[in-house]
Image (spheres, grey):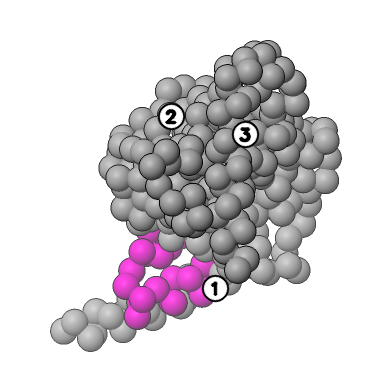
Amino acid sequence: MFLNMFQIRISAMKVLPAICKDSKEYVPKVTDILAQLLQLDESDHNTPTNTLSQIYKEDPVGTLKTVFNHVSSTDDATEREKCLQFIYKKIIKMEEKLTSEIYDLLLEEGKKIIPESDATEFGLVMPYLTASKLTKTIAGQQELVNLVAEKAEIDGSFDPLEENGQNVNRVMMCVDFALPLFNANIESTKFTKFYCDQILPNYDAIGTLKDGSTLQYHALKQLAELSTHCGKLENPSLHVVQIFDKLKHFMPLPPEDADLEKMPNLDFTSVECLLYAFHRLARQCPDFLTADPAVLKDFRARLTYFSRGVGGCKK
């Protein structure tokens, strides 16, 4: 009985393209039904996918609009994901049907999806947007940066333990997509401030998450890259001090009662990232180290001790 029902369903789907070809008014309804069937198990998945592809060839705009409407109207995460996979993995490969109208539709609907997307949906749509014509103009690049900034919620407070750590993954995923967009015309200032003021103070909490040490390293690497295109800061010392304090954590003072010839155990990757970010941002407050002789003396001692570790690694 199960086999017969399976065969009936497959046979029914296979005749749908012919029906839609002769009667275009059925395209929206048929497309919506097939969009729901995209979430079938892998063994059943190919038939609705292929059927929907055939209907798309007959009416690209109508089919695409219906699938996007289904994405926006359903709360089923699996349905949304399967529909977006169909659009941004399969449709974009059918280049013979990618007219300017289709390109614009993919862009505009993609931008609407991003604010409410989960991690999987974000990862499906953003690669298309960041490879689109938007990146060819300064205005388009800025639009994408603003879209990512909104998704990352960099204007709000940050709790790394919120959503079982998914909050951290969301921010870092957003920044990964934003980084290639920054340049001399598109500044990373807001993102840099967020990392200084929100990520660094929560560095230890991030380390308690699953794969915490990997997330910590990635955060410092992102901070270094963000600092490259950071613009003018209103109060640079307020942000630089966050980097400096974290840098001192990784560059300890030499122990008073220990063998100074013994190589300290140092985290070179973290220090490299923080030193670079410090160098980039501290130029906006050039007296940060020299204003207080004690601070400068302390930092010199840390640098000297750290250099012993570097020398020890070379031996």
- State which mark lies toward you, 2 or 3: 3
- State which mark lies toward you, 1 or 2: 2
Residue that carries the numbered disc 2 in the rendered image: 201
Q: Is residue 243 left or right of residue 206?
A: right
| Residue 79 versus residue 144 in the image, above or below | below
* Foreground pick, 214 / 117: 214
Residue that carries the numbered disc 3 in the rendered image: 300
Q: Is residue 22 left or right of residue 184?
A: left
Q: Amino acid at mark 2?
A: Pro
Residue 305, given in percent of the width and then of the height, sits at 55, 45
Q: Which residues are magenta?
A: 29-52
* Foreground pick, 267 / 150: 267
Label 2: state its secondary structure. Answer: helix
| Residue 164 versus residue 46 in the image, above or below | above
Residue that carries the numbered disc 1 in the rendered image: 18
* Measured Cα–Cα span from mark 1 to mark 2: 61 Å
Q: Amino acid at mark 3?
A: Arg
* Measured Cα–Cα span from mark 1 to mark 3: 78 Å
1 or 3: tag closer to the N-terminus = 1
Q: Residue at x 82, y 33 (%)?
A: 185
Q: Residue at x 48, y 37 (%)?
A: 253
Predominant secondary structure, magenta span:
helix
* Foreground pick, 195 / 66: 195
Tell me the quarter of the image containing the N terminus: bottom left
